[in-house]
Image (cartoon, helix red, strand yellow):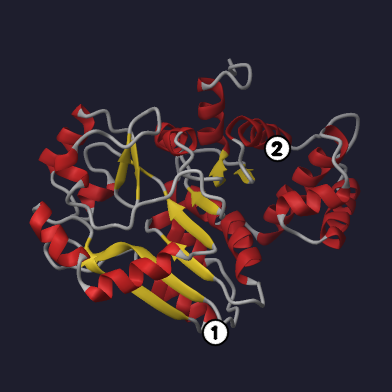
Amino acid sequence: MPPSKDADKLDQAARIAWLYYVAGKTQQQIAATLHISRQTAQRLLGIAIERNLVNVRLTHRIGACAELEEALRRHYGLELCEVVPFDGDDTDGLRAKIAITGGRVMEHFLSSEAPIIVALGTGQTLKSVIGRLPVLPRPQHRFVNLVGTFARDGSSNLYDVALSMADKTGSRYYLLPAPLLVSSVEERSRWCDHDLYKTVARIAGKADVTFIGIGHVAPGCPLERDGYITQLEVRQLLRAGAVGETSGWVLNASGELIKLPSYHDKLTTIPPQRHSRKPVIAFAGGKYKWEAVRAALRGKWINGLVTDESCALAIAESENLITPMK
């Protein structure tokens, strides 16, 4: 079953209680960290007290999530990090849980009255996050896809999200007119040298905030399942040290792009920017993805993350940020 709004509110109240009573942050600092108003932080802190979550120590598992958030935020220099509690192997349930928190984070940026450009990756989790957004009229904003809108066989991207965002906000949206991956360097040049492609790429380069997903690389992974790459190409990527990808750009365990020109030289996706001064926020979870998410963190491809407890814990343990749990 999808998580209830009351459970999400209780998680948020417990997170604020941990930041206030354990981490020693002020209500103003908490509001800035979680992108909420000071009044909301104060109200949720009151809920934590009313529900007896606060005693000598925090009696809610969100305390462990808050510790993981703080550890990841400090180690990787993140501007934003939220870890949601989740047990079990229910992928749909996990995605729904991340989507609730991710939707709140996304809504904060979209609430801007000033016009902004939002760049978008692709993926099931990102699409789920957008599905949790309320209708929020913002015709002044613009949304732009970073990823080609169809596969090699001409089929559409199942997880295209720019149109969904435009439906929620009444904004203009821009699709990248190319396949994600083509068959040769020459073919890539033909697509990427087109005036329409260059126009969309220029808009993406001015993005005020970027929202992306992170995928793992393995047999049956989304890139293969959705028809973007073949089984042979998956094996080639793995031999080159691939552990994860974002918008088709494939990373090794250190967070560097893998050294496989025969792959990246045929990719039409607009390249991600490292060490961005603008928010680049990833939505990804599941323990099976921890190496992929860690690669994006290590490479400084992202500066914001919404994930789940199992993924965050595996990353933190691998970096010796916390004592491994027995």
Mark 2, Cα crowd under 10 Å, few <14 / some 14-19 / many 20+, is: many
**Quarter holding residue 307:** top right
x and y percent of residue 118 in the render?
50, 67
**Quarter holding residue 87:** top right
User: Residue 1, can we see it?
Assistant: no
- Residue at 22% from the left image edge and 52% from the top image edge: 267
Q: Is residue 3 left or right of residue 50?
A: left
**What label sits on residue 66 in the rendered view?**
2
- From mark 2 to mark 1, how far is it between C-alphas? 35 Å
Mark 1, Cα crowd under 10 Å, few <14 / some 14-19 / many 20+, is: some
Q: Amino acid at mark 1?
A: Pro
x and y percent of residue 56 in the render?
90, 29
Name above or below for residue 185 compared with residue 295: below
- Residue at 10% from the left image edge and 39% from the top image edge: 232
Q: Nearer the viewer, residue 65 or 247?
A: 247
Q: Is residue 281 left or right of residue 194?
A: right
Q: Is residue 163 left or right of residue 147?
A: right
Disc 1: which residue: 139
Name above or below for residue 242 compared with residue 220: above
- Residue at 50% from the left image edge and 38% from the top image edge: 88
Count of numbered labels shown in the rendering = 2
User: Residue 34, can we see it?
Assistant: yes
**Quarter holding residue 8:** bottom right
